[in-house]
Amino acid sequence: MSAVTLSNPSSSYYTSSTDYKPVKLSPLNLTNLPKLAPTEEGKRLAAYAAVDANISDSSKVIGIGSGSTVPYVVERIVQQGAALNEERVFIPTGFQSKELIVKNNLVLGDVDQYPTIDVTIDGADEVDNNLNAVKGGGACHLREKVLAEAAKIFVIVADERKNSKLLGTSWTQGVPIEVAPFAYAKVLKNVAKLGSTKPALRMGIKKAGPVVTDNGNFLIDAPFGESYYRDPKELLMRIKMLTGVVEVGLFCGMAKAAYFGYSNGSVLIRSADGTISEQSSI
Ligand SMILES: O=C[C@H](O)[C@H](O)[C@H](O)COP(=O)(O)O
């Protein structure tokens, strides 16, 4: 992979063309890795950059999130070596990450044993300019939020398609809402009253009936108009107040940074302090 630097950014993925002043980080050395399809390349880049920057020798309790970028997170952690990993405990956000931990012979723990986590790295469905995120496309956002909140450092990894100025731009299926099964019909009515256009119970694929989460609950996907996404925290609080709602897939003010991997071999890093950095790869 050749070193690529985004010297003249003009795309919409930056905050704005005028305030774009990236800090250039030293390149990520990824020589001798197998070539992947462009989007996968972006996911791997984001994951590797996030692990390198956030998981150090002193990171002992690590939260492993869900989604298609997370296998690369675990891959990079494994590359840090068995000696280091034997001294660590890994906490999963769901079935997928539990399998990843077990299959890679890492030590499995749970958040009730380790309510304080050093670092949690997780995927996202969409992230806005202020690091607010939609999560729950894979129905894992309840455990994900607990692990994000438990972590001293919570970091998001994703490919370039997830980087938006405003939530609801690329992720149009709505805010994922985990609900107690018996309350779903009432929550559907109440999110519609809040302003959701066509909220729907998420149905299974290759399974008759609704999706059932790892916690035995149902999911509602509730789309909202653009104005609601301008204040995602307010939207989160209003949905969370509805009786029967277990957790809402809006993560506001939680992430320390988001790493977006680009198919051109670079990573864009947005930090909570407003810093925007770029890392190329060789
Ligand atoms: O519930 C699932 C999680 O929030 C995932 O992190 C999110 O849906 C992103 O998944 P993917 O990387 O597969 O698009």
Image (tube, rainbow, N blue to C red):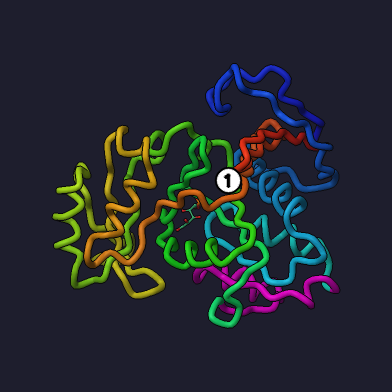
Q: Residues within 10 Å of mark 1 (few under 14, many from 20)?
A: many
Q: Residue at x 50, y 69 (%)?
A: 94
How many discs appear? 1
In terms of secondary structure, where does tag 1 sit?
A: strand
Give the residue drawn at x 42%, y 56%: 136
Specify the amino acid type for callout 1. Answer: Ala
Q: Is residue 4 magenta?
A: no
Q: Is residue 178 left or right of residue 90?
A: left
Residue in front for this viewpoint, 76 or 128:
128
Location of the C terminus by quadrant is: top right
Q: Which residues are magenta?
A: 83-110
Q: Residue at x 34, y 54 (%)?
A: 176
Q: Which residue is mark 1?
A: 158
Point out residue 74 in the picture as x, y percentages from the top left corner: 68, 62
Residue displayed at 55% across by 27% down: 15
Query: Is 84 located above or below residue 156 in the figure?
Result: below
Answer yes or no: disc 1 within 8 Å of ligand 1. yes
Q: Is residue 6 above or below residue 170?
A: above
Q: Image quarter for residue 240? A: bottom left
Viewer-proximal residue, 191 or 4?
A: 191
Quarter of the picture containing the N terminus is: top right
Name the residue at the bottom extreme.
Answer: 113
Q: Position of residue 221 (x, y in %)?
A: 29, 52
Residue 101 painted magenta:
yes
Q: Is residue 87 above or below residue 7?
A: below
Q: Is residue 12 left or right of residue 219?
A: right
Q: Nearer the viewer, residue 55 or 212?
A: 55
Decide if residue 35 is on the left or right side of residue 175.
right
Give x and y (percent) for residue 4.
Answer: 77, 28
Q: Left or right: where does residue 73 sit relative to residue 52?
A: left
